Amino acid sequence: MTSVAPLAQVFAVRSATRTEADVQQNLGAFLTLAPLGLADNQVSKVEVPTGDGTRRRIDVEYGRLIIEVKKDLTVANAVTKAEPQLRGYLEVKRDATGDEYAGIITDGVDWLLYTLAGEDFKRVQTFTMKRPDADSIERLTSWLDGILLTGPKLSPTPDRIEERLGADSPRFRLDRARLEALYQDHGNDAETTLKRELWARLLRTALGTNFEDDTALFLDHTLLVIEAEIIAHLVVGLNPAELSVDNVLAGAAFKSAGIIGVVEADFFDWPAKVDGGPAIIADLIRELAQFRWEDVTHDVLKHLYEAIISADTRKGLGEYYTADWLAKSIVDERITDPLNQRVMDPACGSGTFVFHAVRRFLDAADSAGFSNRDALTLLQETVFGMDIHPVSVVLARVTYLLAIGPERLQDRGTLNIPVFLGDSVQWGRGSGALTQTYSRWK
């Protein structure tokens, strides 16, 4: 950070002597030199003509980010005067490229993040540099990297998941605002309405009086499931960027690859069906591709859920998740013969116990000299999950894949992921195959 520290001393300190041009030039140089992951020949552009036949110029353009620079945002009306300018630039770039750009208004100290969600121009987050020291420069760089998505690939640790994808991350704020605007435009469409009604009916069954049909929760669940389904593609080695958005959310590539029961058409694929939705999903694909999903050592989707759904909301819904260390300890203690014990979690949630049971089985299969294909074939008859919560089931299915891991998934036969949507309390009542199957697993 030493090479950029002198630049921050200029743009991140308000003074009577510095000019707007000083802020702009030093900020542009900082973006070029900071470790933000763009190629060496990609630099920030200063005073960029909009190309719309006017004489307007964008202060700083960097990747898919537009920055409007001001000398001092604490001056009266500085922000309100800058907002129409930034909105105009975002509209011009979207019209010219078809891409969604993020926008920032800054004086180098305060950084105001905006999105153009449909026709709704909205501020979604504020970042403040309290002082131009190494720690603040690193936090600013990380914040900008989270917007630009140009840095090196990251290991999906709980802290990284929360930092880059959680409710307080800049990308979540941008994506969530765009999804909300999309729902405002299409929430009354017949198909979207039906899917929300089905979602509400299932959750009412699962959660009883704890559940309240809430638009914000429906949108959070939509975002979670779409992210989980994109992660599933990345884990298996299917590039979702090469598929149509509709095929990504319907799981067409999984069916062709012989992997059944992971990604299917569901309540949460409505954004793929409406104008503006595919662009949001394309950006989510770009965001999630920044992680190395082969590095997973725990139930990351549980952490993603907890990073998006607030603790108060989870408490109100009666949702509690088991810590990974505790789940692993219980699995290690109770599954004493992994190759000959059948294991089922009848209320699997995001799949924490399932994850560790799968890993324990595969470790035992390796020690016993099983081929990878034989191990995966037997695994499907050994470790199972079930939940009545539709979001949990999607997360648990992807968690099952993550437990197997990308390397093993490259050498497989047909793979059926045995995680089911259903009410295990009612399971086994009456007659039929479920009763017989249950008796085999006890």
Image (cartoon, rainbow, N blue to C red):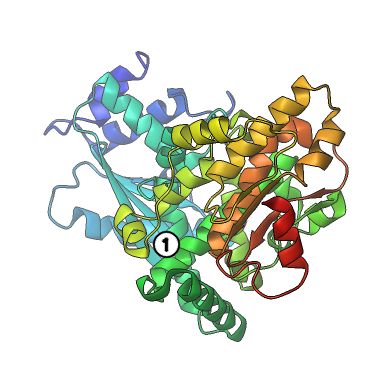
Q: Is residue 8 above or below residue 241?
A: above
Q: Quadrant of residue 372?
A: top right
Residue in the foreground of this view, choosing between 277 and 59: 277
Horizontally, residue 18 falls left or right of residue 174, namely left
* Residue drawn at the location 45% of the way across and 35% of the way down: 326
Q: Amino acid at mark 1?
A: Ala
Q: Is residue 96 above or below residue 369?
A: below
Residue in the foreground of this view, choosing between 297 and 248: 297
Looking at the picture, how far across and down is residue 146, in whole percent?
45, 39
Looking at the picture, how far across and down is residue 103, in whole percent?
40, 51
* Residue drawn at the location 68% of the way across and 31% of the way down: 337
Count the marks.
1
* Residue drawn at the location 38% of the way across and 64% of the way down: 121
Residue in the foreground of this view, choosing between 420 and 240: 420
Horizontally, residue 118 falls left or right of residue 110, namely right
Q: Quadrant of residue 362?
A: top right
Residue 46 appears in the figure? no
Which residue is outermost to the top?
Answer: 2
Looking at the picture, how far across and down is residue 269, in whole percent?
63, 67
Horizontally, residue 268 falls left or right of residue 174, namely right
Quarter containing the N terminus: top left
SS for dot 1: helix
- Report the residue marked by disc 1: 177
